[in-house]
Amino acid sequence: MFFAIFKREFVSFFATPVAYVFMLIFLSLAAVFTFYLGNFYERGQADLGPFFNYLPWLYLFLAPALAMKSWAEEIKSGSIELLMTLPVKVWQAVLAKFFAIWLVLGLALALTFPLWLTAGYLGEPDHPAILTSYLASWLLAGAYVAISCCMSACTQNQVIAFILSVVVCFIYLLIGSSIFTQGLQTLLPSVVLDTLSSMGFLNHFEALSKGVVAASDVTYFILVSTLWLLIAGAVLNNKKSA
Amino acid sequence: MIQIKNLTKRFGDFIAVDQLNLTINAGDIVGFLGPNGAGKSTTMKMITGFMSPSSGNIVINDKDIQADDISAKKVIGYLPEGAPAYADMTVIEFLNFIAEARGLKGKQKKTALARVCQQVELDKMLNKTIETLSKGYKRRVGLAQALIHDPQILILDEPTDGLDPNQKHQVRNLIKNLAKEKIVIISTHILEEVEAVCNRAVIIAKGKKVFDDNTQALRSLAQQNQTVKIEFEAGLPDISQLKLAPGVKTVNTLDNNTVEVTSDANYNGLFSQILDLVHLQGWQVNAMYLDSEPLDKVFRQLTEEAA
């Protein structure tokens, strides 16, 4: 049952140009960020730092765009009634949709491999660090998708789902960013700031990108994703008794 | 078997379904009737496990669906109102998905797909995208997905709504030809449909059950209040005799040529009675017919009493 829904969701992205357009945009923007804004060549370093630094900001819009229709469209078209009367548990459906979208993002990420090849051609990059950066990026993408799926389950309007997702994801990004911590340094005690920034995405993402695979950072992303998927399941269950 | 006990559904202050009790056995083809907003769809949504009741319970094959909704969902085939589907899929992709989600595999799936496509005559449309189909075909796709696992219980919410008379006829035949040991529940507001396909009629109004019996009982209820219209060829003759005929309650003159005769509550031989009288009096009659909507009248009476 889980697999049938997962397959349908995944294939549906490729039935229309959605997935292709998405990948095209993702790859073009990734290239723009890496080479143009990130000064890939001028830095004189053979690593993918510029690419991975901009990735969280790129996902901020692309992950919600991909996930916004996941539940909102089902609710709007009434097909949710069909889905929920199949012999499927709510959590199975939630996970199936999540994994389908996460896999599409994973594919897009995997298609950036020429960047890795380029760095390898130009110098001697730290290959294990690049590998963990890719892992970190995919985990981060999962957290974005989980949040966006949850927002999509809250509304039948895809635009609202998109905007809510961007807002929530942006908050997660912001509280871990240096702009935020430096800006509020004088206003808030450092304990509060540290706690906040440890709840944000960026610290954990950067730690993983440096090639240090700490269980706590991996667990963090899995926990955030699980939490938002649980909320999505609760929201959908609640619709049943509303 | 479906047992519904004290089923109630509230939306805020509004009570959509109010203490409904119903037992449906194998072989019952139930016509579920009621005005719009009477709670038909809500009841169906609760039986299929899409909505949970505010109170009361639903037991399907001796299992409470609140405790075990998956077992219930496995034996139910459901056509939701308006036959929603994934519009961007082709018919065959969609049916394939439903078959897989219902746990059909390999050869079993293939046979099931072939069977439903033949049952609802979808063969020519298999590779068309669902959003490009006409209303009638969309409804058939909805029926096909409800039938694909050969369910023991079939719940159809307005299966013929928006179909043309030929399509309606087809759908009704399909339902009639389903295996005899199944339970079928059809919601509709077309009374003729209930007479044509069902063996039991349940009428609800304002969430409450107002009638529950076989379709013959519904028919005889209708015949208790017969009206016969007579169109005379040239002007009204002396109709005082009509008023004296047995069983006649009232005689109304509708226009220069037409009268309407209503019978007493429990008299059901009005038509032949009047026919005899017409012959006896030697009246020249253009047309003479039993009121064409007796069922509608019963429906109105039953559902307006509750209001």
Image: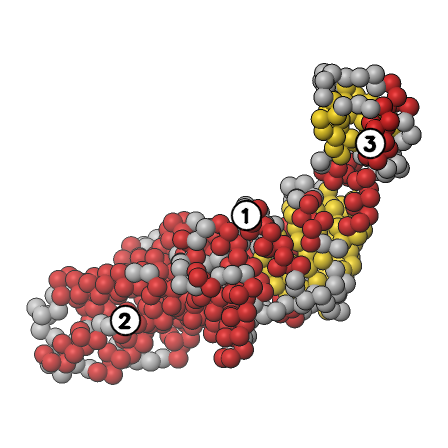
Q: Which residue type does callout 3 highlight?
A: Leu
Identity of the residue drawn at 33% across and 61% down:
A16
Asked if B226 appears above or below B11 in the picture, the reply is above
Q: Which mark is residue B275?
A: 3
- Horizontal and vertical percent for residue B261? 81, 27
Q: CA distance from mark 1 to mark 3?
A: 38 Å
The residue to which callout 2 is attached is: A109
Q: Residues within 10 Å of mark 1 (few under 14, many from 20)?
A: some
Q: Are marks 1 and 3 in contact (CB under 8 Å)?
A: no
The residue to which callout 1 is attached is: B163
- Left or right of residue B66: residue A229: left
Identity of the residue drawn at 43% across and 66% down:
B93
Q: Are marks 3 and 2 on the same chain?
A: no
- Whether residue A179 can be seen here: yes
- Horizontal and vertical percent for residue B208? 76, 45
Which of the pair A125/B196 is nearer the observer? B196
Identity of the residue drawn at 40% across and 59% down:
B128
Which of the pair B225/A2 is nearer the observer? B225
Q: Which residue type does callout 2 highlight?
A: Leu
Q: Are marks 1 and 3 on the same chain?
A: yes
Asked if A65 appears above or below A89 in the picture, the reply is above
Q: Disc 3: which chain?
A: B
Which of the pair B262/A212 is nearer the observer? B262
Q: Please, which residue is most extreme toward the front here?
A: B282
Q: Secondary structure at mark 3?
A: helix
- Pair 1/2: label in front: 1
- Left or right of residue A168: residue A239: right
